[in-house]
């Protein structure tokens, strides 16, 4: 009972931190999209914001993972939370300048990556082995709830002017960013002290050679990238089709709530289908939903396809994350998880250029058609990982 009580308080703080970071970061990025458009950025080039968010962390993320494996979760988790709060404050104060906007988004990306490098490795510390999958599901559920609640704030903004929308969303993000720093500090105080690791860590090459690891990394990164790019390109599609910002906020919330449902039902689905088959089927379903969104339909007709995208990407992302923890060598999970983040950042850096070129030529519809094709490839990668490593 004492052990259970010791775990319970840090677990609650972990879930709250996961919610806050996934509420604050997407809200800030949506605000930045509207602010950039208000400052004259071509809506079809909004993907440059996603690239700015991803490019700097791309070169740091594996080092962050090695740092976590070597020194524990507290330094990366705390500094990352502080950088997120600093980025939001910078964007709020300097929102009238495009260079400051891109710099703030880059800092936000570094902060989120560093924070997650520590936060996601708290899961093994606050759970016993028999309950680890359940705790991981709860952790991902908390992030999904953050994703779901952030777009709802957009619907409460009483304006259709991009600059006013951005400013009001920044103010909300300031409060939640500061709250994240407080919660992360309390969590660090409640965690058990960790001594620095003295023995050599497994090499990157040894980790990469683990059967099935590269395929599951790529599949998960594709799904995470697609889900992330929805934040950028659904508002662009809305502007192209004349859909109000409040409706776009509801659409993003539907996708996020569907992702919440996928995390809540993950245990049942994974036991029924297995991790590998679930990832493959779910990614294929999401690809179908994205392809249907590319069809020129009125906003009301788009709503039935949104849960397919959210549930499919959420299920596939959860299954690939659980599979990575299953496959990764013991003692190198922080590095393996950071490699997943590197894949996510690489996708966020490279895909927007290809998608942006398609958007300039074909508009939002072509963007979603391309995303559908990319997510379909994740289905094949998940199937390959399942064959290589038996992700049951």
Image (spheres, rainbow, N blue to C red):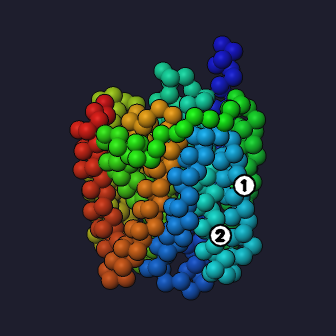
The part of the image, by quadrant, that contains residue 276 is top left
Give the CA distance from mark 1 to mark 2: 13 Å
Q: Is residue 135 visible?
A: yes
Quarter of the rendering occupied by the N terminus:
top right
- Crowd around label 2: few <14 · some 14–19 · many ≥20 (10 Å): many
Q: What residue appears at the point 34 percent right and 67 percent down from the top-left corner?
A: 368
Position of residue 222 in the picture relative to residue 172 (left or right)? left
- Looking at the image, which is closer to me, 79 or 153? 79
Q: Position of residue 173 (x, y in %)?
A: 68, 60
Height in image: 307 above or below 185? below
Residue at far top of view: 1
Residue position for label 1: 82
Residue position for label 2: 104
The part of the image, by quadrant, that contains residue 353 is bottom left
- Looking at the image, which is closer to me, 355 or 286? 355
Position of residue 163 in the picture relative to residue 214 (left or right)? right
Q: Position of residue 265 (x, y in %)?
A: 41, 35
- Looking at the image, which is closer to me, 325 or 174? 325
């Amino acid at each position: 009972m004492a052990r259970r009580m010791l775990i319970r308080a840090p677990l609650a703080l972990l879930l709250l931190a996961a919610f806050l970071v996934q509420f604050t970061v997407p809200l800030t990025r949506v605000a930045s999209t509207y602010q950039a458009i208000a400052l004259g950025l071509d809506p079809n080039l909004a993907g440059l914001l996603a690239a700015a968010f991803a490019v700097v962390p791309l070169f740091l993320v594996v080092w962050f993972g090695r740092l976590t494996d070597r020194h524990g979760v507290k330094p990366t988790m705390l500094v990352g939370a502080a950088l997120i709060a600093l980025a939001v404050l910078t964007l709020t104060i300097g929102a009238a300048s495009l260079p400051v906007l891109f710099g703030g988004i880059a800092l936000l990306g570094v902060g989120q990556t560093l924070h997650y490098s520590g936060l996601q490795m708290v899961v093994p510390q606050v759970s016993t082995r028999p309950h680890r999958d359940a705790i991981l599901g709860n952790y991902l559920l908390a992030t999904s709830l953050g994703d779901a609640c952030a777009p709802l704030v957009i619907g409460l903004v009483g304006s259709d002017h991009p600059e006013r929308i951005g400013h009001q969303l920044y103010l909300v993000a300031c409060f939640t960013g500061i709250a994240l720093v407080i919660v992360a500090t309390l969590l660090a105080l409640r965690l058990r002290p960790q001594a620095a690791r003295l023995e050599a860590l497994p090499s990157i090459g040894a980790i990469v050679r683990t059967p099935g690891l590269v395929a599951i990394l790529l599949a998960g990164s594709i799904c995470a990238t697609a889900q992330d790019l929805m934040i950028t390109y659904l508002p662009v599609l809305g502007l192209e089709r004349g859909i109000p910002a409040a409706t776009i906020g509801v659409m993003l919330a539907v996708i996020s709530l569907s992702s919440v449902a996928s995390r809540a039902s993950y245990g049942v689905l994974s036991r029924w289908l297995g991790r590998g088959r679930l990832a493959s089927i779910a990614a294929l379903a999401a690809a179908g939903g994205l392809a249907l969104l590319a069809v020129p339909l009125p906003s009301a007709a788009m709503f039935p396809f949104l849960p397919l995208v959210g549930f499919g990407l959420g299920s596939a992302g959860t299954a690939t994350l659980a599979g990575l923890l299953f496959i990764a060598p013991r003692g190198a999970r922080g590095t393996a998880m950071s490699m997943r983040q590197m894949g996510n950042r690489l996708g966020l850096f490279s895909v927007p250029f290809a998608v942006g070129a398609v958007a300039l030529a074909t508009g939002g519809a072509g963007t979603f058609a391309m995303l559908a094709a990319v997510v379909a490839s994740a289905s094949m990668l998940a199937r390959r990982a399942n064959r290589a490593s038996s992700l049951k």
